[in-house]
Image: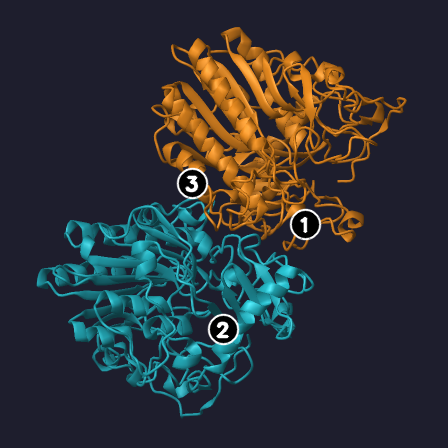
Chain colours: A orange, B cyan
Amino acid sequence: VGPEALSLWKSKSTFTSFGVFLLQMGWGDLGAFGEPSKETPNLDQMASEGMLFLDFYTASPLCSPSRAALLTGRLPVRNGFYTTNAHARNAYTPQDIVGGIPDSELLLPELLKKAGYVSKIIGKWHLGHRPQFHPLKHGFDEWFGSPNCHFGPFDNRALPNIPVYRDWEMIGRYYEDFKIDRKTGEANLTQIYLQEALDFISKQQASQQPFFLYWAIDATHAPVYASKHFLGTSQRGLYGDAVREIDDSIGKILKHLQKLGISENTFVFFTSDNGAALISAPQQGGSNGRFLCGKQTTFEGGMREPAIAWWPGHIPAGEVSHQLGNVMDLFTTSLSLAGLQPPSDRQIDGIDLLPAVLQGKLIDRPIFYYRGDEMMAVRVGLYKAHYWTWSNSWEEYSKGIDFCPGQNVSGVTTHTQEEHTTLPLLFHLGRDPGEKYPLSFVSDEYQKVLGQISTVVQQHKATMVPGEPQLNVCDKAVMNWSPPGCEKLGKCLTPPKSDPKKCFWPH
Amino acid sequence: VGPEALSLWKSKSTFTSFGVFLLQMGWGDLGAFGEPSKETPNLDQMASEGMLFLDFYTASPLCSPSRAALLTGRLPVRNGFYTTNAHARNAYTPQDIVGGIPDSELLLPELLKKAGYVSKIIGKWHLGHRPQFHPLKHGFDEWFGSPNCHFGPFDNRALPNIPVYRDWEMIGRYYEDFKIDRKTGEANLTQIYLQEALDFISKQQASQQPFFLYWAIDATHAPVYASKHFLGTSQRGLYGDAVREIDDSIGKILKHLQKLGISENTFVFFTSDNGAALISAPQQGGSNGRFLCGKQTTFEGGMREPAIAWWPGHIPAGEVSHQLGNVMDLFTTSLSLAGLQPPSDRQIDGIDLLPAVLQGKLIDRPIFYYRGDEMMAVRVGLYKAHYWTWSNSWEEYSKGIDFCPGQNVSGVTTHTQEEHTTLPLLFHLGRDPGEKYPLSFVSDEYQKVLGQISTVVQQHKATMVPGEPQLNVCDKAVMNWSPPGCEKLGKCLTPPKSDPKKCFWPH
């Protein structure tokens, strides 16, 4: 959900630390990517000092699966972050989800341990909230943040408010102990997350231990919030205020690295877990620039992400890369930076981006656009083929839920699941980044390109072994009623009787 | 038609020369404005060395009226570049137009003469092609280019091909002597226009005379062209090739100024005469970024333009301005730079932008969006009110003519002329630059803002004195049959008998 920034840092000596900023922001939310108000001076400067990726993707059009893909280097359909309850449905980890990240998956921080890294996650985990899914059971050494999103509930009576953890234990709950004023949008959370990051980096620098910091904050996820100092400072309303605060925080983190003298030992990456949520626009939703639709869809607006790599002294300043990248690549690239090999006993989808980052090379690789259990589309070079199209159902759409507001493209933004597996809709993303002009089926260009893409797709499908789906079963009994630490706070609630059911995923 | 760049240069001494690059390009065509392929390194560098205007407008959603407004500092409805043949119709200067720029209008180069400036227009004039409208009769000292657009005809039998002039005389015609290969898109014209600019600047620098260069090239107007060296170099197809060549040319002109040591005496401005023509997309049309619709409309995509001011040593590098600007301001600003006053005997709509450019001030002023004889919309601060909405007629639309492809916004991109003069549609362009979410009529925000805007509109309408419309009458007899100089070339054609009629303006 929303933009995400991932950074990978490593301190002095032969080590390289990694920082990943992962948040919910759209491609078009940054000045460097053309936001008409240009209110992200720090991110723009990060880009001007590093490498801007223009063709960078997430692995899923929504939050949990993208985050699982980032940390495992694998497509959600492999690591289990998908559903088979219905065809091509987006699924994530709401409070009543029973599943989460399987123990069989190897997460980046687990692997980095072998190279002596200390890993911290700040912000939203979103890979499952039951005890076995706790981030400290999956390789992270420290955690400050929440297992689920802050979008509700808000009362802690009928349903538990989302807990905020420090490491193993809950230290409070959203809306109760960590205030978010839903009227004014005021909340101090980004400032707290910023301080956590600065402190962690200072500690690691002092102890000369390499680190992996995963700063996965969520101020730009509805209900959007910003702290008092930033409220009302944007031309873009509350969403813009939140973006300004995040931008400011990232600037402070980068300056902190420089001040401590470890910026040249720290590889930092900024990106997002899905496109801007246009259902929340314009008050609480960001921008996907000129791309089609937003979060929840496999159009470019749902999955193409802002992305910046920063590593002073290593990445030449002001570079622009057309490398097709994916959040899963951060897994493989981080391992490479740490001198580690990716696991050889499983399919890894992420590639090592270092040749692109350090030498400006272009590595040929496809981008797959999945929605739940279905490969909806694939990008090869500048061409994208849609094998299935769907924005959302007529039933949802008629209730005003619109993932493509003001962007109806006839035959493309369909409200029924349309199969195009025989003759996929083909777009040239250079001439037509907005996916508005499908190539004619009878053109030479279509025939030639389809042949190339078909080979890629056949190979992909032939070797695909889906993981066990984790997002099929929901049960109110598994919600955050009594997280560890609740006793100390007097915040334990009594769960209802277990009643597992198939989760309902409407889109 | 298309993007335009205006630059104002002045050589040594107390003088400041002006250069204006004026072409047909959309807001979203520049890397600095977020084009996903980032293929304009020279314009991006121009922006990083100067000031990027994010809220800059043209005076009309199409070519001729915008150009007339730029050179007169006045809205087309005042200087006569509009029609009254039907309500709210776009009109320009096709070959059979009888009208043109009236002698009563004072053009920028005419006024600059008083301060010793030498003015040259390179490229498309478009303010009328009959003898009395010749640019050298309206203040320019030199001309290399064409009176009309190069979009046809292509045969020089039934109808004359467009002449190319050097100063007073035609030296050839498009497609005959100045080739444009309509199959491959190859044409060497931008290179010729570039050389003309470099030569003119060298001459002026050598003679130490201040100059005004108006570089109004048209490679990005359909049929789009590029020279051999640039063909196939873009990720965006032929349109992108043309953009790359223009970008390269502008880089060369700026470097030439620097090499000659006159860059600090030369104020250069880049902008466009209308938004990208989406009817020509994606093969021959550009991008308006995230703005709604394109050329021919009064939505942001039709009238918000890319704009860069460059003046090394005067404009601090890397500035971003939210000043509401308009091409008409280049008139007033240029006069100010030359130490001249704008005419006091008529209403001038352009304002002096120097306080914004040099001191970063924000001058409060509205932007009026006209279509022909009708004020369709107005922008005050971050708010825009539509008093009339129209994309084009159902009749045109049903034939496939679409100014808003893939951007249907219900009730906004209407196919009948919809009047909203009692309750205008109101948008907040900061939260909603795409004009997709009209404010609720019953909101406090609407009520408050409408009051402020109404005052501005009442004042504007109360003092408006329209000029005599120049674009009402068409006659095949006035076409470029026998331009001066045709005898020498053996290219005189015989005009048909005069048969003046009301021009038909379908949108």
Residue B452 on image: x %, y %: 54, 68
Residue at 70 percent of width and 36 percent of height? A151
Residue A201 on image: x %, y %: 47, 19
Q: Quadrant of the N terminus of chain B?
A: bottom left
Residue B395 seen anywhere in this rendered image of the structure: yes
Front disc: 1 or 3:
3
Residue position for label 3: A41
Front disc: 2 or 1:
2
**Which amino acid, mark 2?**
Tyr
Residue B177 on image: x %, y %: 29, 68
Tell me the crowding category of disc 1: few under 14, some 14 to 19, or many 20 or more residues within 10 angstroms, Cα based: many
The front one of B457 and A98 is B457
The CA span between labels 2 and 1 is 33 Å
Q: Which mark is residue B370?
A: 2
The CA span between labels 1 and 3 is 34 Å
**Which amino acid, mark 3?**
Pro
Above or below, B502 relative to B235:
below
Numbered marks: total: 3
Tell me the crowding category of disc 2: few under 14, some 14 to 19, or many 20 or more residues within 10 angstroms, Cα based: many
**Which amino acid, mark 1?**
Thr
Name the image quarter holding residue A57.
Answer: top right
Secondary structure of the residue carrying tag 1 is loop
Q: Quadrant of the C terminus of chain B?
A: bottom right
Label 2 chain ID: B
The front one of B81 and B114 is B114
Above or below, B93 relative to B293:
below
Above or below, A67 relative to B158:
above
Secondary structure of the residue carrying tag 3 is helix
Residue B294 seen anywhere in this rendered image of the structure: no
Residue position for label 1: A413
Label 1 chain ID: A
